[in-house]
Amino acid sequence: MANLKIIIIDEIGKMECFSQKFKDFLWNLLSKPNPLLGSISLKGNKFIEKIKHLPEVRLVEVSKE
């Protein structure tokens, strides 16, 4: 695990989900053993909801409070 690189994705949102190329790329990243840190839309389409419900995904909501 010491040699794994952390993958950071700035946003997984509604507009990004219009790109099949992006979605395919993201699924490929999610299948890797690398830790992934990303921001994801609170509300979204089926693709976003599917990511949120993956067993290995941990969601942390960030707010102004």
Image (cartoon, rainbow, N blue to C red):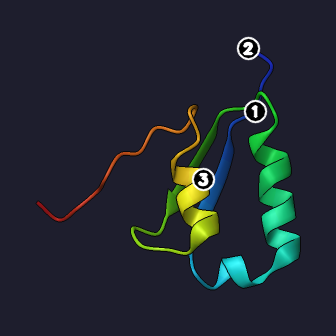
Give whichever of 43, 64 is nearer the camera: 43
**Residue 32 located left or right of residue 48:** right
Mark before the other along the chain sequence, 2 or 3: 2
Residue at point 57% right, 64% down?
48
Task: Please give the residue where the numbered disc 1 appears in the rendered image.
Answer: 5
Q: Which residue is drawn at 56% across and 33% down?
A: 55
Residue 47: horizontal and vertical position, in percent?
64, 66
Q: What element carries label 1?
A: loop
Question: Disc 3 residue type?
Answer: Ile
Q: For mark 3, give the secondary structure.
A: helix
* Callout 2: SS: loop
* Residue 10: quarter of image: bottom right
Q: What residue type is labelled 2?
A: Ala
| Left or right of residue 53: residue 62 | left
- Residue 41 seen in this snapshot: yes
Q: Are marks 1 and 2 in contact (CB under 8 Å)?
A: no
Q: Looking at the rendered structure, which numbered label has been put on residue 2?
A: 2
Q: How crowded is mark 1: few (under 14 residues within 10 Å), some or many (20 or more)?
A: few
